[in-house]
Image: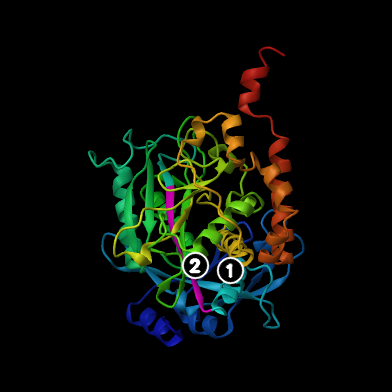
Amino acid sequence: MPQKETVLKVVHDESIPRIWLWFTDILGQLKGVEIPPSELEKALEEGMGFDGSSIEGFARIEESDLMAIPDPSSFSVYRDPATGRPRSAQIFCDLFEPDGSPYKGDPRRVLRNNLKKLDEKGYCFHVGPEMEYFYLQSPHDPVGFDQTGYFDASMINRGTDLRRRTVTALQGMGVHCEYSHHEVAASQHEIDVHHGDALRMADTVMTIRYLVKEIATEAGAYATFMPKPFYGKNGSGMHVHQSIFEGKQNLFFDENDPYHLSTFAQHYVAGILRHIREITAVLNQWVNSYKRLVLGYEAPAYVSWGQKNRSALVRVPRYRPGKHNASRVEVRSPDPVCNPYLAFSVMLAAGLKGVENQYPLPDPIEMDLFRMSDSERNAFGVKTLPGNLHEAIQVAQESELLRQTLGEHVFSKFIENKKIEWDQYRTQVTDYELRTYLPIL
């Protein structure tokens, strides 16, 4: 991992013109301050002060001073995809009070705290996100660049070129991209990242969101991770592959189980399934998120698990002989605009609660849940995810698991933010209402 001296040497030797100090607000929006190389050493030693109300999301109150302390191990260099020349460097920061105590409202600190509990048991939480998004002409002209479909490689278009440039830039920053491809909907793309430590992967999610948009904007285009930008088309999700290691041993693998899931992993999945409704407000935090979680578009609406079932909320990818460390579970409900630090925290907490209490894993469902009737789903005991943000908030605010995982400060601020968003949304008069009701009422 890079240390302070290494960071300073790279910035000097490569003549990097500017450095971004990054952190996120409660809602997972990237925040940052740009500094010249001459200020880097001071920032690494003392941090940079800023107005703490900027990370409160919608629920901003009085100004308060905070310090952003760069984490040298997160240092990376953004190089021009065409020339390879360094354009900037980025370092993620941890947030502190002026007296040096950790700031309780720092989402990155929330994940650190939850990973520390796991580390005390000798375990490591690995995640691998799949990021879906759309390329458009502009945010005001929501027209894509192609009419191709899933895994289509028959046409090289503007979106494909932008995705390739982005992957090149990410690899130059040390991000291990396993796959990238066209997704199901027109002008929809996906970038998959090799699994790794959850904190680094949360940083990586933020980096991907930044670079995808940055490179598109520089090319005169627009990229959006909005969960459901178009009616009648697939939305964009962030499937999160998860496993827990003890040293080099994957605790999720058992060669004798039909699904190659260990007892530990079975309890973990049971924990996800039991607590998914109460953590959904974190995994799907925007009003628009719930337009994606509907029938017929490959996004899960029902709480179930399986292996071949693409309508299941939790999927267990098939085991490949000799790939013990690749055994994992895939949670398919999160979307790519959640706060990854909070999302990884709550999924881990839900899974570990299942391990701790030895929740029994229900039988898998390999049938298409979307084609079942309500009575058939009820016979299997299948529950539904919250149908909108309001319902998700109602469930979340009663969750002791969520309160403990996020900490009182982040929990209360997050709920307050989501209530503000719902109130803003529910009082709007939409184009749909005007088209439908104005002519007849």
- Secondary structure predominantly adopted by residues drawn in magenta: strand
Q: Which residue, as the protein is rendered here, is positioned at the far bottom? A: 5
User: Who is closer to the viewer here, 166 or 216?
Assistant: 166
Residue 111 is tagged as: 1
Q: Residue at x 54, y 80 (%)?
A: 43
- Quarter of the view holding residue 268: bottom right
* Marks 1 and 2 in Cβ contact (< 8 Å): yes
State the scheme by which the image is colored. rainbow
- Quarter of the view holding residue 440: top right
Residue occupied by mark 2: 198
Residue 121 magenta: no
Q: In what element is the residue under mark 1?
A: helix
Q: Residues within 10 Å of mark 1 (few under 14, many from 20)?
A: many
* Residue 231 visible in rendering: no
Q: Where is the C terminus found, in terms of image quarters? A: top right
Residue 182 image point, x, y percent: 33, 44
Residue 251 image point, x, y percent: 46, 69
- Start-end of magenta stretch: 122-132
Amino acid beneath label 2: Ala
Residue 129 magenta: yes
Q: On the rendered structure, is 310 left or right of 403? A: left
Q: Where is the N terminus found, in terms of image quarters? A: bottom left
**Quick check: 432 above or below 440?**
below
* Residue 437 visible in rendering: yes
Q: Residue at x 55, y 86 (%)?
A: 45
Q: Residue at x 60, y 75 (%)?
A: 117
Return the disc, 1 or 2, that comes first in the chain's sequence.
1
User: Who is closer to the viewer here, 51 or 1?
Assistant: 1
